Amino acid sequence: MKFMSVIGSAAGFLAASTTLAPAQDMAATITEIETATAKYRDVNTALSEGFIPDPSGKCVTAAAEGLPPEWGGMGIQLP
């Protein structure tokens, strides 16, 4: 089984890991992430491919992880 939050985690990690890269590299990374995850804009596609929502039904927030609340949170985002 796959968790839908894995998509967000991977995208966030890849974007954060390139913060020191030139803007052109960052743009290429963002395009790569968008291309790889585009089909999951339809939550039914993700579900049909074995992703499941977080069983707790809760989003991860920075505050819940002991981080500054202004850092926000992560969860299943639907267009």
Image (cartoon, rainbow, N blue to C red):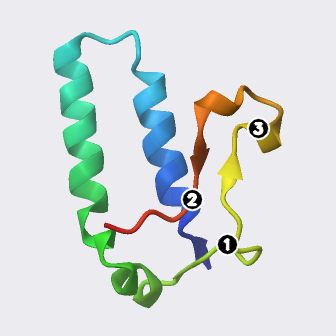
Q: Position of residue 77 (x, y in %)?
A: 44, 63
Q: Residue at x 24, y 63 (%)?
A: 38
Local packing at callout 2 (Cα closer than 10 Å; few below 14, some 14-19, many 20+) is some
Where disc 3 sits, the SS reads helix
Q: CA distance from mark 2 to mark 3?
A: 14 Å
Q: Quadrant of residue 45?
A: bottom left
Image position, residue 27 (x, y; %) = 19, 28
Residue 75 got which mark? 2
Q: CA distance from mark 1 to mark 3?
A: 18 Å
Q: Quadrant of the C terminus?
A: bottom left
Label 3 Cα neighbours within 10 Å, binned few <14 / some 14-19 / many ≥20:
few
Mark 1–mark 2 CB contact (< 8 Å): yes
Considering only order in the chain, which callout, 2 or 1, is on the residue closer to the N terminus? 1
* Nearest to N terminus: mark 2 or mark 3: 3
Tag shown at residue 54: 1
Residue 63: numbered disc: 3
